[in-house]
Image: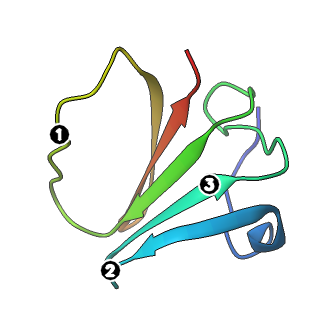
Amino acid sequence: MTDRFDVHAIRHRLKLKRDAGHTSLFENRDSVVCPACDEPFAEVLLTERRKHSFGPTESIRFCVVREGDCMQLFTHEP
């Protein structure tokens, strides 16, 4: 498994979809693998917020990685 996910090192392989300062959402454009499961992810949400609520969604698989003050949520296609 990957030791650390560095969004800045792979930024050229992702598309920024939303940036709210404390929270960013990126789309995976180049089959980057998730550091938790080593499978390509669809999107990654990076947030420094202590808590986060997600709206109603279809059945979705996701992985969560915490690095210091940043939580990383990786979604995967069903």
Where does residue 68 sit, x and y in percent of width and height? 42, 64
What residue is disc 1 on?
55
Apparent side of residue 71 relative to residue 75 in the rendered image (left or right): left
Question: Residue 27's image quarter?
Answer: bottom right
Cα separation between marks 2 and 1: 17 Å
The reply to whether discs 1 and 3 touch (Cβ–Cβ < 8 Å) is no
Q: Up-down: is 50 above or below 53?
A: below
Apparent side of residue 67 relative to residue 54 in the rendered image (left or right): right
Q: Quadrant of the C terminus?
A: top right
The residue under the point 57% across, 61% down is 26
The reply to whether discs 2 and 3 touch (Cβ–Cβ < 8 Å) is no
From the viewer's side, name the closer residue of 49 and 69: 49
Q: Up-down: is 61 above or below 66?
A: above
Which numbered disc, 2 or 3, marks the residue that appears first in the sequence? 2
From the viewer's side, name the closer residue of 45 and 71: 45
| Residue type of the residue flagged with mark 1 | Gly
What residue is disc 2 on?
20
Question: Looking at the rendered structure, which numbered label has been put on residue 27?
Answer: 3
Mark 3 burial class by Cα count in 10 Å: few <14, some 14-19, many 20+: some
| Residue type of the residue flagged with mark 2 | Ala
Apparent side of residue 22 relative to residue 26 in the rendered image (left or right): left
The residue under the point 31% across, 70% down is 48
Where does residue 20 sit, x and y in percent of width and height? 32, 80
Q: Quadrant of the N terminus?
A: top right
| Residue type of the residue flagged with mark 3 | Glu
Q: Residue placed farthest to the bottom in the image?
A: 21
Where does residue 32 sit, x and y in percent of width and height? 79, 45
